[in-house]
Amino acid sequence: MKPVYLDYNGTTPHDPEVIAAMRPYLEEEFGNPSSSHRYAVKPRQALNTARSQVAGLLHCAPEEVVFTSGGTEANNWAIAGTAHALRDRGRHIITSRFEHPAVLNVCAFLEKGGYEVTYLPVGEFGLVNAADVQAALRPDTILITIMHANNEVGTIQPIAEIAAAAKHRGIRVHTDAAQSLGKITVDVNALGIDLLSMAGHKLYAPKGVGALFIRNGVALETFMHGAGQELGRRAGTENVLEIVGLGKACEIAARNLEKNRRHMREMRDRLHAAIAAGVRDVRLNGHPEKRLPNTLSLAFRDLEANRILEAIGLEVAVSAGAACHADSVEVSHVLKAMGVPVEWAKGTLRLTTGRITTAAEIDRAAAIIIEAADKHRKSREVF
């Protein structure tokens, strides 16, 4: 039997409809969409269709969507592009302590160039307090970048409230929505944001493709220099094959959002209930309610996540929140930011369900994890 896959926040398999949509651009329609001859027609039409499909999921205009090589590029462009475009207005950026490295490392890089970054704390549930954002605003603040939902614990941030406070001061707001798209409603107008990053491989599309929403009127410093592709905003011949896949994935996500959200939550809660009933000293990391419907971060007290992974790795695919070594424990920056005690953090597993996860898989995975945790605890008690 194949291992049960419960790492959907890490990456997702390709949806069959996505593969079918991509196939002509792998086998036949190889033309460059920027060319003037007939071979360019269908690839160019495919780009336009994909842009509209992405816009449909985000509730924005197609011309506000620019394709990138993934979420990391989109984050880099949104943050560094804003910093350079608005450097004459100020050099202060606000973010949180438990953003993805594709945000934190960009901010750290900008600090080397003279920008100042305020790293906001998060509470025990991993929730940024909008009042803390408000208190951190300065006359020279040019950008707030807070993720829509956290990749490890799933906590959903109050982006609309944060953006409303920023709007009155003319401060730009960016959100990394790689994890939330396809799981909860993401409406750029309801959120009130200026920039949004997305990654295809979190959405049942291929790796190596993503997009950046850039609200009309928002100026960004050019990130990729070259010819005039992507509405003159990002140079480089478009990755038509994968852009088509991203577009189809967005269409599917919009079409089946409520159905998929309900199913992922049911599978997540079934898994949580089974493990909680079968293992002692286990607790949830993250907000119990304001959380992605598929995300379950569980901490096993005084156990080591890597030992559990070793025991279940051939049968269940999950991620760890800490790495334990002979003389040290490396806890993820997310759990550190939340103040999770080390005796809990070192035994944290991230289990994330998908829209094709079955109840049989959940029951099998729960039994395997319960057995592994029980054996690990007994072995510790012996020594």
Image (tube, grey):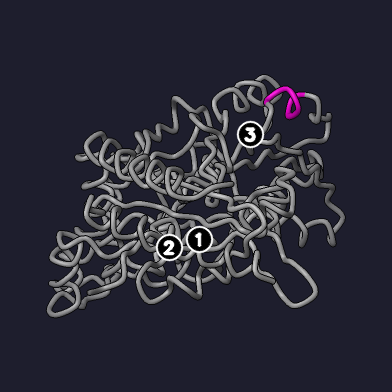
Quarter of the rendering occupied by the C terminus: bottom right
**SS of the residue at dot 1?**
helix
Q: What residue type is labelled 2?
A: Glu
Q: Seen in the image, is 150 located left or right of residue 333?
A: left
Instruction: Using the numbered discs, state the Cα–Cα distance from disc 2 to disc 1 in whole angstroms.
Output: 5 Å
Report the span colored magenta. Answer: 130-134
Q: Do the residues labelled 2 and 1 touch (CB within 8 Å)?
A: yes
**Residue at horizontal 85 percent and vertical 62 percent from the top:** 112
Res 374 label: 1
Residue linked to disc 2: 371
* Residue 239, x across and y down, in percent: 34, 70
Q: Seen in the image, is 304 located left or right of residue 200?
A: right
**Residue at horizontal 37 percent and vertical 46 percent from the top:** 274
Does the magenta portion include 262? no
- Quick one: label 3 or label 1, which is nearer the N terminus? 3
**SS of the residue at dot 2?**
helix
Residue linked to disc 3: 127
